Image (cartoon, grey):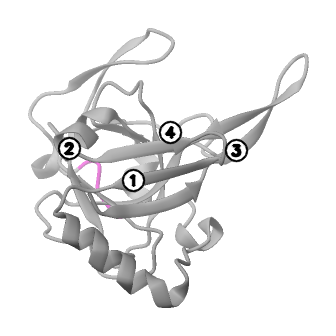
Amino acid sequence: MPLFIDRLPLQSRVVSGAAEDRRNWLALLPAIVSQWELREPPRGARPRWWKFDTGCGPDACAWRFHLESAGLDPSDPDQLAPQRRRIRAANDAVESLPTRWATVWLVSNMLSLHHSPFPLVLRPGLPFYDRSPRRTADIFPLLGMGAFRRARLKVKIDFDAGTLSVWTPGPWYRGVSQFLRRLPGRFATIPPEQLCAPW
């Protein structure tokens, strides 16, 4: 399987609590969300951070402002699935959410693959909270495991090194050619602070 995302650093945030501050670790992936019928993401679209969440039931989940920031109209009736999607949140609350047809494109942090994003088809689409959260800072859309399983991706989170890597399906020789293309640049990757635009 060819390597697609190479040792992307895990990110962390300090969260203030009643008794003490604690550091939360996040497995964030660079991705672009687009209209579902496109064969590639729009030109000039910059990736944004999506949180890889193994507990996310649907393929993905977002808030209205995520769609609007990506240039997608969450109110377009032609782009909404006919039925709402029932979502169970981490606090066990159940909500029925509108679902927008969309494709999420993973973006590589390797220079040689950065302009060749990998599509994740969302079934039945992208459920979203049709309102604004109390705050938008550090609120990321979620990527669940369903789309990753269907796309037959391999994900490795190395907690000792604090990195996340992703491999895509393909013949062994694609991995060899990718290795040879990266050799002159000494396997350089795009730094996380340059990789994504903020939400």
Residue bearing the label numbered 4: 132
Give the prevailing secondary structure in the magenta stretch. Answer: loop
- Say which label, 3 or 2, has the lower sequence index: 3
Badge 2: residue crowd in 10 Å (few <14, some 14–19, many ≥20): many
In the rendered image, the residue lying farthest to the right is: 19
Measured Cα–Cα span from mark 4 to mark 2 = 22 Å
* Three-letter code, disc 4: Ser
**What residue sits 55% from the left and 83% below the top?**
186
Tell me if label 4 and label 2 are in contact, CB under 8 Å.
no
Magenta-drawn segment = 71-75
Looking at the picture, tell me which residue is in the foreground, 60 or 189: 189
In front: label 3 or label 2: 3
Q: Which residue is drawn at 23% across and 72% down?
A: 174
Q: Magenta segment: does it hold 149?
A: no
Q: Position of residue 54 (x, y in %)?
A: 41, 29
In the figure, is residue 187 to the left or right of 46? Answer: right
Identify residue for label 1.
Answer: 166
Given residues 180 and 40, the one toward you in this image is: 180
Residue 8: x, y in percent? 55, 58
Nearer the observer, disc 3 or disc 4? 3
